[in-house]
């Protein structure tokens, strides 16, 4: 089992990203071979572009396509994605309580770190939204990284931990990430315009955001 887990982690790491923005950094992971990747909303909040670094050290530019502030999710896209990266598959159901899980992220700038634990509660409600509670260590910089089962499938997107408590950490269910990904795939990653005010994308280009109505040159100022 240990050898199989190590093999799975080795494959999964090739899909994981470091996401750098002016305010800090976080994690993310590729979900499509065309360069679409998932991270947290709070990692890319307020920016339209970010720098991403792949496991093999390549530094690429990515655009924010769409973001979901309520569920703390975002979809980004890099047109420069090399063919050597892996992609991870999102599951379409919740995990089971006590299921073994693995997280990969960038805690405290320790790139591509792996932690392991169990699902403490598969369907925890926090401030009206569903979260997966886990005892896997999720520290600053790991936000946006994948929470994986032992088959290497994405159960959730790591989003927060409580530093004052041990073993109390959370991930956004992969089902919600899949819904946002479907929305992003209906947009052109090269011509859509991402509004940092409302977190939504509009297409085709116009003077105003189709969702919140803010004037684009004003919102960009």
Image: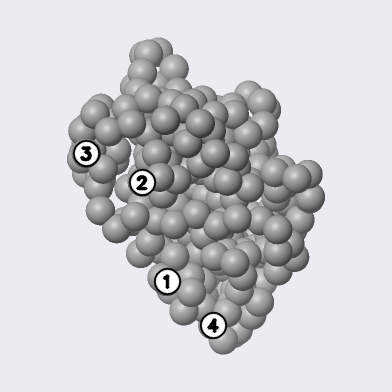
Q: Is residue 189 above or below residue 107?
A: below
Please tell me which residue is depicted at 67% across the width and 28% down the height of the picture. 109
Residue that carries the numbered disc 3 in the rendered image: 96
Does label 1 or label 3 sit earlier along the sequence?
A: 3
Q: Which mark is residue 105?
A: none
Q: Nearer the viewer, mark 2 or mark 4?
A: 2
Q: How many labels does the image show?
A: 4
- Contact (Cβ within 8 Å) of mark 2 with mark 4: no
* Residue 181 coordinates in the image, percent (x, y): 44, 65
Residue that carries the numbered disc 4 in the rendered image: 203
Q: Residues within 10 Å of mark 1 (few under 14, many from 20)?
A: some
Q: Residue 183 carries which label?
A: 1
**Disc 1/disc 3 C-alpha distance (Å):** 27 Å
Does label 2 or label 3 sit earlier along the sequence?
A: 3
* Outermost right residue: 58
Q: Quadrant of the N terminus?
A: top left
**Disc 3/disc 4 C-alpha distance (Å):** 39 Å
Does label 1 or label 4 sit earlier along the sequence?
A: 1
Does label 2 or label 4 sit earlier along the sequence?
A: 2
Please tell me which residue is depicted at 59% across the width and 29% down the height of the picture. 113
**Mark 1, secondary structure of its residue:** helix
């Amino acid at each position: 089992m240990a050898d199989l887990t190590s093999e799975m982690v080795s494959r999964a790491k090739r899909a994981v990203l470091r996401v750098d923005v002016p305010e800090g950094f976080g994690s993310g992971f590729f979900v499509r071979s065309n360069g679409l990747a998932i991270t947290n909303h709070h990692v890319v909040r307020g920016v339209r572009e970010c720098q991403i670094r792949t496991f093999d050290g390549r530094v690429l530019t990515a655009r924010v396509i769409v973001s979901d502030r309520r569920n703390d999710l975002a979809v980004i896209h890099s047109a420069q994605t090399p063919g050597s990266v892996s992609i991870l598959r999102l599951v379409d159901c919740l995990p089971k309580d006590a299921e073994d899980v693995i997280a990969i992220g960038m805690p405290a700038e320790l790139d591509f770190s792996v932690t392991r634990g169990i699902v403490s509660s598969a369907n925890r409600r926090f401030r009206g939204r569903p979260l997966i509670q886990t005892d896997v260590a999720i520290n600053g910089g790991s936000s946006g990284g994948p929470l994986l089962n032992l088959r290497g499938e994405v159960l959730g997107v790591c989003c927060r931990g409580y530093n004052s408590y041990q073993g109390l950490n959370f991930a956004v269910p992969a089902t919600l990430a899949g819904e946002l990904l479907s929305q992003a795939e209906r947009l052109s990653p090269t011509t859509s315009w991402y509004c940092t005010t409302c977190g939504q994308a509009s297409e085709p280009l116009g003077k105003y955001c189709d969702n919140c109505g803010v004037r684009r040159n004003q919102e960009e100022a």
